[in-house]
Amino acid sequence: MRVEITCTNRVGILHEIMQIFGEYRINVTSGELGGDSGDKVYLLAPGMLATQYQTIEKSLYRVPGVQRVRRISLLPLERRYFELDTLLQHVTDPVLSVDHAGRVIAANVAAARAFGVSLDRVPGLQLQRFLPLMQVAELLRDFAVPRYGLPVVVRGQNFRVDWSPIALDKPGDVDPLAGAVLRMQPWEKSEFIAGLPRPVALWDFDLRRESCLQLQDLAELGSPLLIYGEAGSGKTTFACAVHYLSPTAARADCHRIVPQDGKLEIPKHLRASGTLILDDLHLLRSEAQLAVLRHLRSLPSSIRLVATCTAPQSLVPALAQRFSALCMTLPPLRNMRPVLPRFAETLLRQELPERERPDIGAEVLDLIRRQDWPENFNGLRDYLMAAAGSCERRSASAIALEDVPDLTAQKSLSLRDWGRGLSYREMMEQLERSLLSELLVGRASTRELAKELGISHTAVANKLRKYGLSAQKK
């Protein structure tokens, strides 16, 4: 039996109500507090008889503040559950919810059919089993990731996936999520999206967190967007995410164009809506940039323009003016030294399957943290792949210092920014190693170097041994 009690909100009234049920030895298995005005108590007592209810009802009315007692058919949460379950079962598109580990919690009949299993077998299955390229764990770890129109293939059928995050605290929080609700819409694959890279998570660590949050806001707008940053800082990844983070992705396509032979050829026939990504505009000469600008003026206003370049100054003034409304910059890796080890581990997880993925030794992570990485993610990825290959040849389980290519630190920005995340001693060691590396070039004897520096030969030999350097013959 289910009971609804309307009462005033005062301290101790719930205790008095429950005490009455206890005196009559009635077991209450669940309950709710709330109602439209916050003045309701809902209780479920499965074993309560009608005669017992009549007696308890009289006792409840003697409690100060109790205004009304009545029997109901369903608790509010039960009613919402049955209504939602009935609604989902009649939705023709697959709908399912997953937890933070990518495990399916619930699904409708359409989802079970799409996955080719019975409905009772869906809960508990790993979504990665059906969507191996979706990177479910990364999607739920990083909030600023593709949410609309994500193209996937399930058992040979094409779908567009929209997913809504279930945040632990407030909506829009970038902390880890509790899970997500996914909706899969059947979609006929077109050539329009064939050249678009596979969507990936954006890794909202350290300074990139602000960039990710900014991207979420800008993705909903319609003005042209310019994303600039150093080579390898993730400009193309963010440009593609503009489309997948925009609600228009569920009903529009995206096209990405890269310069070839110093030119950027924009297709003559584009759909009336969607996202057009113009990559690496800084590689174009002034004449080619002006030609692109003339072509852009003829495009429909419903096409969202997104461009990438190393800096706004690399564009001719007229083209820079076209993208002047919305701009964002991506930080280089050397400005995020505190989380460089985390970037390295995440990048290795993305590039290699789990069975082939080695760990990264603490000494290697510390070395990575102290480097400048002028090629940013591109350089770090190649560095890790080379080290992983050496580790595999040794049949080792973790990348050690002997596996990594030699690196020489080069100061390429202001000392304060360059040294972010380094102690004073580490900064001085970096500078000393760089200086000794340059002074050793062409010297066959360390004694000659010691004489030039005005220090003992023993001191020079100790420093070279410390940094793993040696004299280089001409």
Image (spheres, rainbow, N blue to C red):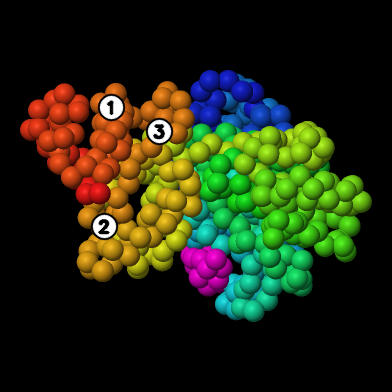
Residue 125 forms part of the magenta stretch: yes
Magenta residues, as a range? 120-133
Q: Which mark is residue 411?
A: 3
Q: x and y percent of residue 352 in the render? A: 41, 64
Q: Which mark is residue 428?
A: 1
Q: Which residue is mark 2?
A: 403
Q: Is residue 334 visible?
A: yes
Task: Give me the residue at 15% from left, 41% from top.
Answer: 445
Three-letter code for the amino acid on which mark 3 is drawn: Lys
Residue 130, by quadrant, is bottom right
- Whole-Å distance between the Cαs marked 1 and 3? 11 Å
Task: Give me the residue at 52% from left, 68% from top.
Answer: 132
Three-letter code for the amino acid on which mark 2 is drawn: Asp
Reading the chain from its start, which is encountered first: label 1 or label 3?
3
Q: x and y percent of residue 416 in the render? A: 42, 23
Three-letter code for the amino acid on which mark 1 is drawn: Met
- Whole-Å distance between the Cαs marked 2 and 3? 24 Å
